[in-house]
Amino acid sequence: MMMLRRDRRALCCMSAALIISTCVLRSESVVAFAPPSTSAAKRRIQNSMLLESTANNGEMVLARDGDRLLNVAFSNLDDRDKYETVLTGLCAKVIDGGAANSKNGLVDPIRLMEESNSNGITIGPRGIISLVDATALASDARIMAKILSLAITNGSILRYGTLQGEINPFPQSSASAFPFGNRNNNNDIERLQNLPAVPVDDRAAEVSQAVLFSGIVGGCVAINAFGGLFGMEDLTPITNLVVGIAITTVVVDNFFDAIVMGGSAVAKMNEDKLPAGAKNMSAPQKEDMPMGIGTGSMTGSVVRGLSRLLNVNTERDCQCEAAAVFAAYSLGLPCFAFQPNALEGASLVIDSMRSEPRSDDDAQNIQGSLDNLASDSGLLKMLIWLLAPVAMELSKYPQLMSSDPCEAQGFVNRLSDQARNNMQYASALLDALPENEEQTNDYLRWALAEADLLLRNNKNIVDALSKALAGGAATVGDCVAILEEW
């Protein structure tokens, strides 16, 4: 009986403790993070108490809220770690909410960054990585510009846009009235004249021809294999002839040199076994072959198209993506598209020409300002960004597979259309754009050369970035961490 009473008393004590602790927890309010003052912390410790039951005799013991492990651990952090922890948590909520709610979700992280700047507290790498990843979901260049500007002010980002001064401006030739370019340097003009042309890449035609060739050969093979089931045996000789001619033409047209070299080597090794008349024979020359066979002009596009359809090279793709991200970050462009395209580039230029964002697009006032890219230097930076993947791939491979040089020309064409159809931007765009096709080709060649020089001068960090992307788990924030060498 005594044991039962003591158990009941202990049970009542524990119930009372639970009720009191629940009331205390419900009475606490949640506020935005700010480092608490000492007096406020003391009042909170004195006013919030929990009840515990001892294991020995069930007596009620008061325990302070500050003794809880979470509060003790958080109070032991310095202000820098507190801001970083809260910022990381806020950004995690934005990422979990998805792209649809990312703009509204970024309000609190941006306000927290502004607060940390005003207090002179530098945010650590973990918080910045989370913030960049959360901002990337919004796909808004102005919001990204706002975030990067806050991070630069905060002192957490140091290398964004730092290589703009290393870009050589387009040379203004005295022999032609170029409306762009800002210096007349004989060395630069000579360099421009010696630059190779931007590669021509007609991948749509190549893929179309490859599909047509595959369809014809596949159809003939299917008739040979299953024609007997449908009474089509009479077509077998014709299909065999078509397949033989098609394959032979492709092989000879694209591998002529290898065939000649191999045949000459075999003939030389067996020279004593050859008939007397065959010893004096020489291999045919490409120029003497009918219809240009042997030069690749007839079926080269088919082979290139088949390569595009059948070849999947993740490492190659990641190298091109790393080049684009590095070019954008180092030149101060708030666009981290892994595969840059003409539409995004033209949209960024037009958006940069507005001094302030539209009020209906920025109800929460979270968008930043953009540097005006409608200038010769701005246009050159955009073209370098678009051609950086091309420069990377040309430096490592003979054929372009992952990058597309047509995006740069498409970018210029889109801006030209805007200059003709939008009077609001016509004057600024016409001053920045080249006047004719010849000038455009010169500008593209110069941009490609500058992109190649930029990547070669920073080869180690670009290679590190491409390896991280090849791992398959790198985010935009991770790329920033590599670029900042955190």
Image (cartoon, helix red, strand yellow):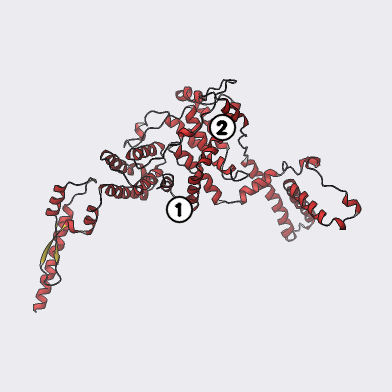
Q: Residue at x 33, y 42 (%)?
A: 104
Residue most extreme to the front? 187
Q: Amino acid at mark 1?
A: Ala
Would you call the spot at circle 2 few (<14 residues within 10 Å), some (14-19), or many (20 or more)?
A: many
Q: Nearer the viewer, residue 92 or 191?
A: 191
Q: Left or right of 31: which side holds 397?
A: right
Residue 481 horizontal/vertical position (percent): 41, 47
Decide if residue 65 is in sight here: yes
Decide if residue 341 is in sight here: no
Q: Which residue is mark 2?
A: 446
Number of labels in the image equals 2
Q: Left or right of 212: which side holds 152?
A: left
Q: Residue at x 27, y 40 (%)?
A: 120
Would you call the spot at circle 1 few (<14 residues within 10 Å), some (14-19), or many (20 or more)?
A: few
Q: Is residue 448 above or below residue 80?
A: above
Q: Residue at x 25, y 52 (%)?
A: 77
Dot placed on the residue nearer the N-terminal end, 2 or 1:
2
Query: How far apart are the alpha carbons under marks 2 and 1?
Result: 34 Å
Q: Secondary structure at mark 1?
A: loop
Residue 330 horizontal/vertical position (percent): 45, 38
Residue most extreme to the right? 276
Nearer to us: label 2 or label 1: 2
Q: Are marks 2 and 1 in contact (CB under 8 Å)?
A: no
Q: Left or right of 341: which side holds 86?
A: left
User: Which disc is residue 140 wearing?
Assistant: none
Q: Amino acid at mark 2?
A: Trp
Residue 34 horizontal/vertical position (percent): 23, 45
Q: Residue at x 34, y 35 (%)?
A: 362
Residue 342 horizontal/vertical position (percent): 52, 36
Quarter of the rendering occupied by the N terminus: bottom left
User: Which disc is residue 473 wearing?
Assistant: 1
Q: Secondary structure at mark 2?
A: helix
